[in-house]
Amino acid sequence: MKLGEKIRYLREVEGSLRGLDRPITQQEMVKAIRQELRKSLSQSYLSQIENGVRPHMTQASRALLAKFFKVHPGFLVDDPEGYHTELTSDLRTTEGQLDVWLLQGSERFIGDREVSEVLIKAARDKDTRRALLLLGAILDTPGLAERLLEALRPELKSGENHLRESRLRENHLRENHGRSHGRDRNRAANADGRRGR
């Protein structure tokens, strides 16, 4: 893959991460770099790189783009002649597919901000597959998820306890109401039975 293709791909991913439902434009990228990293890069420079007019970048530009896209600077070069992506491991392919899947999920759950943000964090993790396997191991270990939730997000745990307590109260009230309603019916039946004698 050529450097220009990689930059186009990264703009696509960045646009998705930012919730644009499209690639981030070169101009939006220049503006974001200026605002977020306090550095500058011209749109024409990016265009030259993407179109192959400028086949190489300066070390400073490579470092800046790597920081912006959160990738290793070594990724931002042309792949060697004869390099075939199909020879890469399935993990790299899986990693990309997982990231896209998680990003699509974050868009689907945009109404639940916390869930959406967690899916984006997982997609941005250097090793998404490992993060998901870790989540699976946590869920497979009895009681571990609850203990971690209590330690890391106690406000969620207390909300869960509050919900559980209110459900218990509701069930208790229903049962008591049912019993008292049943007693009232039994009393009425007994009273009717006495009258009938």
Image (cartoon, rainbow, N blue to C red):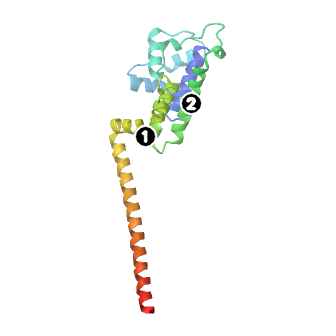
Q: What's the amino acid at mark 1?
A: Glu
Q: First in sequence: mark 1 or mark 2?
A: 2
Q: Quadrant of residue 64?
A: top left
Q: On the image, numbered disc 1 is attached to which residue?
A: 114
Q: Can residue 22 be seen in this snapshot? A: no
Where is residue 104? Give x, y as percent: 55, 36
Above or below, 33 relative to 146:
above
Where is residue 71? Give x, y as percent: 48, 19
Q: Residue furthest top?
A: 81
Q: On the image, numbered disc 2 is attached to which residue?
A: 100
Give the side of residue 182 with respect to residue 129, left or right: left
Above or below, 40 relative to 103:
above
Q: Quadrant of residue 150?
A: top left
Residue beneath the point at 33% across and 46% down: 158
Q: CA distance from mark 1 to mark 2?
A: 18 Å
Where is residue 144? Give x, y as percent: 41, 35
Give the side of residue 180 with respect to residue 103, left or right: left
